[in-house]
Image: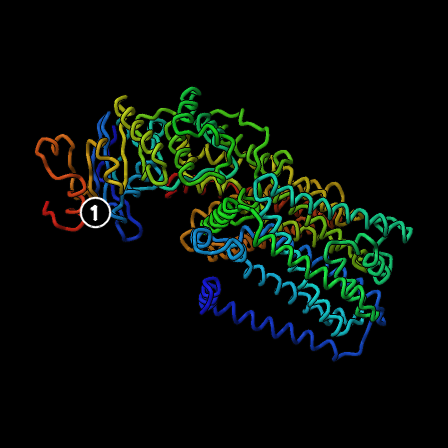
């Protein structure tokens, strides 16, 4: 007879044939990738055991982090409201309750292994890795992920109260920051180079050094696990046996702690389940994570609501919510992260071989990446969330004024975002980006951010009955269409001007293109504002 | 005073509310009863100005779409939807400011009355359903409205809060406020109701006044409700 958890899992899976089919296809694909390792003789470099050990070491660190996040951060979120009711109150031991979300975590671990397996051919070509190395790497990764997962779960359940819970995350984050800084310092000192020149060091030397450096080798579980493989390679079974024994011992201790320890995490599981539920509900209503408060943590500090009267209370509340959730003044945490990722991606792209020959391409790429990020960041803002709650409708003010203050509350953030975008554009290709282009791009981004915000509000109000996915498709289809039309319009204006007034320099025409697009978006925003106001007055809340 | 006159609310072809009319005078407590899907929450949302409708709804003689009417209206929704990132204190402060209400003293009274004092610095999302309901009630009352509508106000409340809410409703009634309550929990409103409207399929099937019932020694609300909803009454 199946256990209740297995029964639930089997019956849930039965209703997801597409997921099963995709899983089977992914599994076959993963196996095929592993099998293909022996098919080709081409190699970029000859085999070096030190390099393989280092590579495995780095992958194991990734596996540890992934497992830990699964256990510490995602574990409480993987309880559903029904789990909270039926499992916590049901005739199950606490350990069994703790194991309820393990199924989802296990799927996550399988995904990690599958992803690593899919890189098999690349690893063979690049580093001459063989199937044996790969199997060891996958096996050790699974073991490390299990250890990290249970460590994360133990910390999550034993420190489930507010501040203590966050403290574990901060320790984890702090440890990684220290690790990265130490490794950077050691590596630059070892190779006598500056940080920016690190990528000039041959990749194999860099990997070998990092993988064998003491901060990596002493990394919890991952560092120790790589000794197991090293022992196996060198025929030295002392580290091999020691590593195995330690791993089994640790996992045993963690499970024993979960089985017999005193802990209480019902409140956190419920609050996370509620949050996940809210998240789903918000998505159904068309509010798609990104910059909404649902996506970030809020903690009460010393800040107080002391501004605003009547309409301006709404404005100040928006700013207050941003201060509370991000703690970087009015800047939304999620949007700020998006900017960082965007800048990181472009900096990374700049290091690609040969890209310096195509600086204009970098600018075009930067504009595209920034705009794509902004369509996500600004189509789920606070204004949309605000109009999904009854308070705003009850406040005795004119709908158009309420809409105006909500939109106005986004201005500081949009201004900050646009400045960031201008900076990102500059760093994408400092040789060809002029101040004219940066300024016009800032203007463009202000108009574009407002456009995303207003279009999303109108779409949510107009198409929410279509359901979440159709709403998303419709929304992005409209965005893509309008962006293409605006792009076409600015090209046309530039061409007409060039024909009438003669050729323009590249930076001048690009800046003009940005301004023409900005004007077009501003006009669309004005239309959308009018439409949104009409809808708020005439449509159901 | 609350007047609902000939209100119809359609969802495509389906009439959730069908030419509904009723009136509540100052100091009267009206109750909307009815099975699930009868249209109670829909009419309440129409009164609160959340849904568009045809017909007329007036708060003290002013159309409910007018801002003056909104100032005189308090609404406790069926499902409390608080801001995730604001504490109890901040919710009340925000609503007080948005409604331009100077009466901070009343805010403190409500917090004390509903035993929210020790949770003042808890975020909206950290509160239990009952606590959220309490905050929702406080938010609806903080600007001292003259017409208050409660959609299932007792769901999730603890016995003390139920007792407090009942006594608060009686106090509001004594102050001449108009109160409209939608509920399934018939026994909880036995002591407070003046007029009951039993709804079926978007219409009012029966209206009864407490005084008439008392005089005529009619059936209890419970009995009346089941007779209507189970189709045993030819009224």
Q: Chain of mark 1?
A: B
**Left or right: A541 as drawn, with respect to A375:** left
**Left or right: A108 as drawn, with respect to A41:** left
Q: Nearer the viewer, residue A511 or A493?
A: A511
Please name the residue shown 15% across and 36% down the image: B208
Query: In the rendered image, is residue B224 in sight?
Result: yes
Q: Residue furthest right?
A: A192
In which quadrant of the rendered image does the C terminus of chain A lie? Answer: top left
Query: At which x and y percent is residue A452?
Result: 55, 46
How dense is the environment of label 1, judged by Cα within 10 Å: few (below 14), some, or many (20 and up)?
Answer: many
A109 vs A399: above or below: below
Please name the residue shown 59% across and 34% down the image: A323
Please name the residue shown 72% across and 42% down the image: A423
Q: Nearer the viewer, residue A226 or A246?
A: A246
Query: At which x and y percent is residue A465?
Result: 40, 53
Query: At which x and y percent is residue A105?
Result: 58, 59
Q: Residue furthest bottom?
A: A39
Q: Residue furthest front?
A: A260
Query: At which x and y percent is residue A472?
Result: 50, 55
Query: In the rendered image, is residue A521 in sight?
Result: no
**Left or right: A329 as drawn, with respect to A452:** right
Secondary-structure class at tag 1 = strand
Residue linked to disc 1: B200
């Amino acid at each position: 007879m199946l256990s209740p958890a297995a029964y639930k899992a089997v019956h849930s899976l039965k209703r997801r044939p597409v997921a099963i089919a995709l899983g089977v296809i992914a599994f076959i694909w993963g196996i095929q990738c592993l099998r293909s390792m022996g098919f080709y003789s081409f190699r970029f470099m000859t085999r070096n055991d030190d390099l393989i050990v280092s590579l495995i070491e780095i992958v194991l660190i990734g596996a540890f982090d992934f497992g830990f996040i699964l256990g510490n951060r995602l574990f409480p979120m993987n309880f559903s409201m029904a789990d909270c009711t039926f499992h916590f109150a049901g005739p199950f031991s606490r350990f069994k309750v703790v194991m309820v979300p393990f199924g989802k975590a296990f799927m996550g671990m399988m995904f990690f292994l599958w992803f690593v397996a899919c890189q098999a051919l690349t690893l063979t070509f690049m580093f001459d890795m063989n199937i044996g190395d790969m199997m060891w790497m996958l096996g050790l990764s699974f073991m490390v992920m299990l250890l990290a997962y249970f460590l994360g779960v133990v910390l999550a359940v034993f420190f489930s109260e507010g501040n203590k819970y966050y403290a574990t995350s901060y320790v984890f984050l702090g440890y990684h920051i220290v690790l990265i800084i130490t490794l950077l310092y050691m590596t630059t000192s070892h190779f006598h180079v500056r940080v920016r020149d690190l990528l000039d060091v041959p990749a194999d030397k860099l990997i070998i050094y990092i993988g064998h450096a003491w901060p990596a080798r002493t990394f919890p579980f991952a560092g120790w696990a790589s000794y197991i493989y090293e022992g196996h390679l060198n025929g030295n079974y002392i580290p091999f046996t020691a590593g195995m024994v330690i791993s089994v011992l640790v996992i045993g201790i963690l499970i024993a702690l979960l089985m017999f320890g005193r802990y209480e995490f019902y409140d956190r599981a419920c609050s996370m389940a509620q949050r996940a539920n809210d998240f789903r509900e918000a998505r159904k209503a068309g509010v798609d994570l990104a910059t909404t408060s649902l996506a970030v943590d809020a903690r009460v500090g010393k800040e107080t609501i002391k501004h605003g009267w009547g309409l301006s209370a709404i404005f100040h509340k928006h700013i207050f919510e941003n201060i509370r959730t991000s703690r970087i003044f009015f800047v939304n945490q999620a949007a700020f992260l998006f900017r960082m990722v965007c800048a990181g991606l472009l900096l990374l792209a700049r290091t690609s071989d040969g890209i310096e020959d195509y600086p204009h391409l970098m600018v075009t790429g930067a504009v595209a990446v920034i705009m794509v990020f902004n369509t996500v960041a600004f189509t789920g803002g606070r204004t949309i969330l605000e109009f999904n709650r009854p308070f705003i409708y009850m406040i005795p003010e004119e709908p158009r004024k309420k809409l105006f203050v909500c939109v106005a509350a986004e201005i500081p953030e949009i201004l900050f975002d646009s400045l960031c975008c201008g900076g990102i554009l500059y760093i994408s290709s400092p040789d060809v980006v002029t101040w004219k282009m940066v300024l016009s791009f800032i203007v463009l981004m202000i108009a574009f951010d407002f456009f995303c915000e207003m279009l999303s509000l109108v779409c949510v109000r107009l198409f929410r009955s279509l359901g979440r996915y159709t709403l998303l498709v419709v929304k992005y289809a409209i965005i893509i269409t309008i962006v293409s039309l605006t792009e076409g319009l600015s090209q046309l204006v530039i061409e007409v001007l060039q024909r009438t007034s003669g050729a323009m320099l590249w930076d001048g025409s690009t800046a003009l293109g940005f301004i023409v697009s900005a004007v077009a978006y501003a006009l669309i925003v004005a239309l959308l504002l009018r439409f949104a106001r009409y809808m708020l007055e005439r449509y159901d809340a | 005073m609350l007047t609902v006159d000939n209100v119809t609310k359609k969802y495509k072809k389906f009439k959730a509310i069908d030419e509904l009319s009723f009136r509540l005078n100052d100091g009267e407590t009206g109750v909307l009863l009815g099975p699930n899907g009868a249209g109670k929450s829909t009419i309440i949302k129409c009164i609160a100005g959340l849904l568009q409708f045809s017909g007329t709804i007036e708060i003290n003689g002013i159309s409910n779409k007018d801002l003056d009417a909104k100032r005189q209206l308090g609404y406790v929704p069926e499902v409390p939807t608080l801001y995730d990132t604001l504490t109890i204190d901040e919710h009340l402060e925000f609503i007080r400011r948005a409604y331009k209400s100077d009466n901070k003293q009343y805010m403190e009274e409500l917090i004390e009355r509903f035993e929210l004092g020790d949770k003042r610095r808890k975020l909206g999302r950290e509160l239990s359903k009952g606590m959220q309901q309490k905050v929702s009630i406080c938010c609806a009352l903080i600007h001292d409205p003259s017409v208050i509508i409660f959609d299932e106000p007792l769901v999730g409340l603890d016995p003390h809060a139920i007792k407090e809410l009942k006594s608060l409703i009686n106090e509001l009634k004594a102050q001449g406020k108009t109160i409209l309550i939608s509920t399934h929990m018939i026994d909880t409103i036995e002591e407070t109701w003046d007029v009951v409207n039993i709804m079926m399929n978007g219409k009012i099937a029966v209206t009864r006044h407490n005084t008439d019932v008392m005089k005529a020694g009619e059936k209890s609300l419970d009995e009346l409700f089941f007779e209507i909803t189970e189709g045993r009454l030819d009224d």
